[in-house]
Image (cartoon, rainbow, N blue to C red):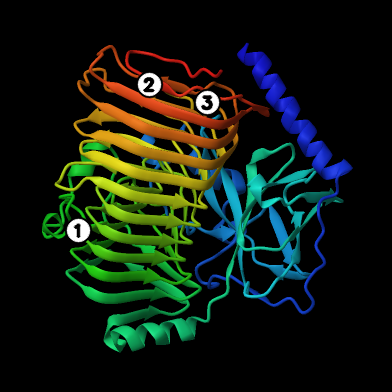
Amino acid sequence: MQTIVKFLITLFTTVSIFCSNLVFPGTVYPESKNFDFSYLEYPDEAIITLEEAGLTEQELVGRASAQLPEYVQSGGYDDINGITISPYYTAKVSGEEIPVYASVVFIRVDDTGTLHSFSEIYVDSSEEFSFNIEITGADVELKNAIVLPESHGVEAQCKNNTVKASINKTGVYTFLFNDANQYYGYTLMVREKVDEDKEIAAYIEEYGEDNVWVLDKGVYEYDYVNLVGNKNLVIYLREGAYVIANHLFDIDCAEDENKYLEPTAPGDNAFGLTRYPFINFYKCENITLAGRGVIDMTRLDRRERRGVVFTNCNDVTVKDVKIINSPEWSFISYCCTDVDIDNVDIIGNRGNCDGFAICNSHNVSIDNCFARVADDTFEVKALGGTMDSKSITFTNCIAWGGYARCFGITGEVNKRISDVTFRDCAVIYRDGIWDNDRIGSLVVVAEQTEGSIDGVLFENIEIFRDEGRPILVKIYDEEAENFEIKNVVFRNVSYTSYMSPKIAGTDSNTNTVQVELDGITANGNKLQSPEIRFIIGKHCEVTSK
């Protein structure tokens, strides 16, 4: 049966791609006259080609191969940064060539690495605009293309190894080529143009010049950045500011993870970490990390440090930055209130480099973000400590999961989790199937069950392709007693997947799992009037009337 489903999915996808590229040429908007845009460009001293690094493409992407020992695969290196010039593509917007960069990513389906290519342009959307993009294969032959998420309504034309598309709104557009091959993805970020000088001046006027720290375009190297008790502070990374984490501790095996101690670190974070996160905020208030710079942790060994971490902070704003190749948990909010995250992108190829981990925090919004990592991408947890997790909203976020889960409640539920929303989001690919009772695209999975879950909404979500389960609600802890998962709603969700959704409890009848399904489209077929199920027991399958 699964073989038949795989065949139908492949046939449906192939026919869709064939039609979108040959029969229907796609909507072509008249290009705006005198279309004005700028593009992201990193400093030459930070970005080198593979040839300049003395590497072949196979050597670079091979560093992410799971055939290597774990601590070698996830180890750091310093001969090339985490962003390089893409060997795969060149691109033009309105006839003007723009930079195409690339970072190593992980593909779970065959445990190997590849390069994800990307560009970023800035437009003024206060008036209507439209432009054409042309992507030409350099080291890749382009036979066809699709543009995701499908909700953007952008179709692509392919001819003579060049793909063309018309775009008329801001957003994140991911192009897949050659029958939706996930090895050669290209993402174009189209974002609002910002006058950096004007924005910095506004911050200075509000907070004072001493409280606005600006990094201009260029390369900066730090062992770590530690901020404790700061108030009314802005750290601004101008476009092209390239921040590199220095490698200090050799982590070659599991025993090495606990070998090195930075003596003041445990007192400067709420996790009790023995080494500082690369950028650490603790007990800060009214703190902003902004600007179109990049934070690159490629040199660090596996679990040498965590990435950008906020603990016990209030009134936090993070916007526009990119986080590259963290060795463990890329972005963390823990025991924080009033957190606003916007236009932040995370790319990483190492195990445990989770994307956005929102833990024990209140009033958090995550908007317009992109994550392609080798672990969970957009997740809510409730660890130890005193705070629960509540009032957390993800909107317009795009996930590409190379190992575990894309959106949801994942793992630790040691406190109550409530009022969590994932809305207008998309999954490009998710290809992990190593434990289909723990991972999926949209999940509510409780592995630790000292708390409860009440009120989780997944609404207007599209999943292009999942190699395993598109939806999973599960009490994974078989010893759980009196644990509740209730008021979980999946509304207007469409998916293509090789496995069916699963909703399951445990042997104990003291546990509760309550899920509502409304407007579910599975592999192109609309499920009619999905049943609202109140589930108590070991195992339940999703049914529909």
Residue 246 lies left or right of residue 112; in this view the side is: left
First in residue order: circle 3 vs circle 2: 3
Q: Give left or right: position of 299 versus 51.
A: left
**Closest to the observer, 424 or 55:** 424
Residue at (51, 45) in percent of width and height: 399
Q: Is residue 42 above or below residue 50?
A: below
Residue type, label 2: Phe
Q: Position of residue 105 (x, y in %)?
A: 52, 45
Give the residue type that dot 3 points to. Answer: Gly
Instruction: Report, in whole angstroms, how far the alpha carbon at label 3 lies from the one at label 2.
Output: 24 Å
Q: Which residue is at 25% across, 61% downward?
A: 280
* Mark seen at residue 468: 3
**Could you give the CA–CA distance between mark 1 and mark 2, rounded to whole angstroms?**
37 Å
**In the image, residue 411 lies at what x, y percent?**
31, 34
- Label 3: few (<14), some (14–19) or many (≥20) C-alpha neighbours in 10 Å: many
**Which of the pair 44/100 is nearer the observer?**
100
Which badge, 1 or 2, comes first in the chain's sequence?
Answer: 1
Residue 22 shows in this picture = yes
Element at label 2: strand
Q: Which residue is mark 2?
A: 534
| Mark positioned earlier in the residue sequence (1 or 3) | 1
Q: Element type at marker 3? A: loop
Q: Secondary structure at mark 1?
A: loop
Image depth: mark 1 or mark 2 in front: 2
Image vertical order of residue 72 relative to residue 498, above or below: below
The residue tagged 1 is 312
